[in-house]
């Protein structure tokens, strides 16, 4: 099963569909470097689409084009069925909520003032903004920090305030660029909880992330891109089943690397063997014979687990670090 969909075939199939965002044949180059290459995807109402790929794959450039911050060289971006970016940028942005990678909170304003001023950007009446501030601070678990300025908040609090601010205009769709980068595990989990609450309310989300557990937890579908091209698209578990053997046995410790050699007796029990650093990854549809064979090397430590999104990501995009990573 091959999950890459020809973008032009996809575009014909998508005509007339009720998509909140429909991107067709998007292209963007900087000099001789094509950053986004004939990319097509869509988001349906109530859906969370995750965009994953290595650094430099084109994720942020794609998001910037969708937000009208970078002009595409070719292709079309349509929101809410009939609004085109960048021609209808103001009308589109009035119905979007955006959380950028970097903190864009005003350091001179308190948490509630940040919400108030941001609401004014959308032309909202002050009484309508103030009516939403208390509930948004409660949503972000920030009620006790209403009078605190961003400099007094933790990283997790700032991200939750950014998310609450993005909701001030009651957007139909959220666009989140790596919203949990730099957060500790507790802060990440609280952010995930808030995003899941929004999804339960029917919000549509476009999410870029480097965290595979985040992608698997939050996303209905995934778009995997590399070198600006779509290389896979589908539901997380479907992609794993399509591209990977179901079981993984990780080997590490003394003697592990020798077991990755082509003449290793373990090779007959693995469909595929990969090495990353000092760890050997054995992919197999039947782990038990491999685990039994490993008993002959008691000094080698092992971990048996199901294949996951990280395995998928590394298979599709490679294990080598990128220059701009």
Image (cartoon, rainbow, N blue to C red):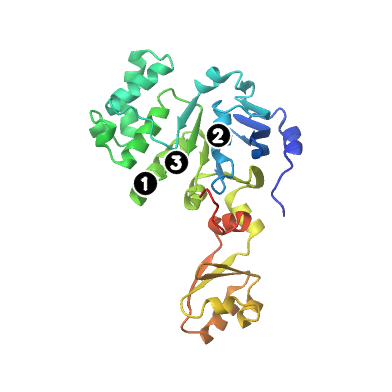
Q: Nearer the viewer, residue 121 or 234?
A: 121
User: For numbered disc 3, what is the local secondary structure?
Assistant: helix
Nearer the camera: disc 3 or disc 2: 2
Locate residue 47, reporting x and y percent: 55, 37
In the picture, measured across the screen, residue 180 lies left or right of residue 276, that is left
Q: Nearer the viewer, residue 133 or 88?
A: 88
Residue at x-position 52% and y-position 41%: 208
Q: Circle 3 is placed at which residue position?
A: 196
| Residue farthest along the front direction in this orientation | 31
Q: Earlier in the sequence, mark 3 or mark 1?
A: 1
Q: Is residue 266 above or below residue 61?
A: below
Label 3 and label 2: CA atoms lie apart by 21 Å
Characterize the local packing of mark 1: few (<14), some (14-19) or many (20 or more) Cα atoms within 10 angstroms: some
The total number of labels drawn is 3
Which mark, residue 306?
Answer: none
Q: Is residue 130 above or below residue 29?
A: above
Q: Circle 2 is placed at which residue position?
A: 63
Q: Earlier in the sequence, mark 2 or mark 1?
A: 2
Characterize the local packing of mark 2: few (<14), some (14-19) or many (20 or more) Cα atoms within 10 angstroms: many
Which mark, residue 183?
Answer: 1
Residue at x-position 63% and y-position 55%: 316
User: For numbered disc 1, what is the local secondary structure?
Assistant: loop
Q: Earlier in the sequence, mark 3 or mark 2?
A: 2
In the picture, measured across the screen, residue 158 lies left or right of residue 249, that is left
Q: Is residue 21 above or below residue 231?
A: above
Residue at x-position 33% and y-position 28%: 135
Residue at x-position 65% and y-position 81%: 263
Locate residue 177, reporting x and y percent: 48, 38
Q: Is residue 279 above or below residue 143?
A: below
Label 2 and label 1: CA atoms lie apart by 22 Å
Locate residue 266, reporting x and y percent: 61, 79
């Amino acid at each position: 099963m091959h999950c890459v969909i020809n973008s032009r075939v996809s575009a014909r199939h998508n005509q007339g569909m009720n998509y909140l965002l429909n991107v067709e044949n998007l292209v963007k180059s900087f000099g001789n470097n094509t950053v986004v290459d004939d990319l097509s995807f869509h988001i349906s109402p109530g859906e969370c689409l995750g965009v994953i790929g290595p650094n430099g794959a084109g994720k942020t450039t794609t998001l910037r084009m969708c937000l009208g911050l970078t002009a595409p060289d070719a292709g079309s971006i349509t929101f809410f069925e009939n609004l085109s970016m960048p021609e209808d940028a103001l009308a589109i942005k009035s119905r979007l909520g955006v959380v950028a990678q970097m903190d864009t909170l005003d350091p001179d304003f308190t948490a509630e003032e940040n919400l108030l001023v941001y609401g004014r950007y959308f032309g909202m009446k002050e009484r309508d903004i103030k009516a939403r501030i208390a509930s948004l601070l409660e949503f972000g678990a920030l009620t006790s920090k209403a009078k605190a300025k961003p400099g007094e908040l933790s990283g997790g609090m700032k991200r939750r305030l950014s998310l609450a601010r993005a909701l001030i205009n009651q957007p139909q769709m959220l666009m989140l660029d790596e919203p949990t980068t730099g957060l500790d595990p507790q802060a990440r989990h609280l952010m995930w909880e808030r995003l899941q609450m929004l999804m339960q309310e029917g919000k549509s989300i476009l999410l870029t992330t480097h965290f595979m557990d985040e992608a698997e937890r939050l996303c209905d579908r995934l778009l995997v891109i590399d070198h600006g091209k779509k290389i896979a698209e589908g539901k997380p578990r479907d992609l794993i089943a399509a591209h990977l053997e179901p079981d993984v046995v990780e080997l590490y410790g003394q003697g592990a690397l020798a077991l990755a050699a082509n003449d290793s007796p373990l090779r007959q029990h693995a469909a595929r063997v990969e090495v990353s650093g000092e760890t050997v990854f054995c992919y197999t549809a039947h782990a038990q014979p491999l685990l039994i064979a490993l008993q002959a090397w008691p000094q080698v430590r092992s971990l048996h687990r199901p294949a996951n999104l990280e395995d998928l990501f590394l298979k599709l995009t490679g294990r080598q670090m990128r220059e701009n990573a």
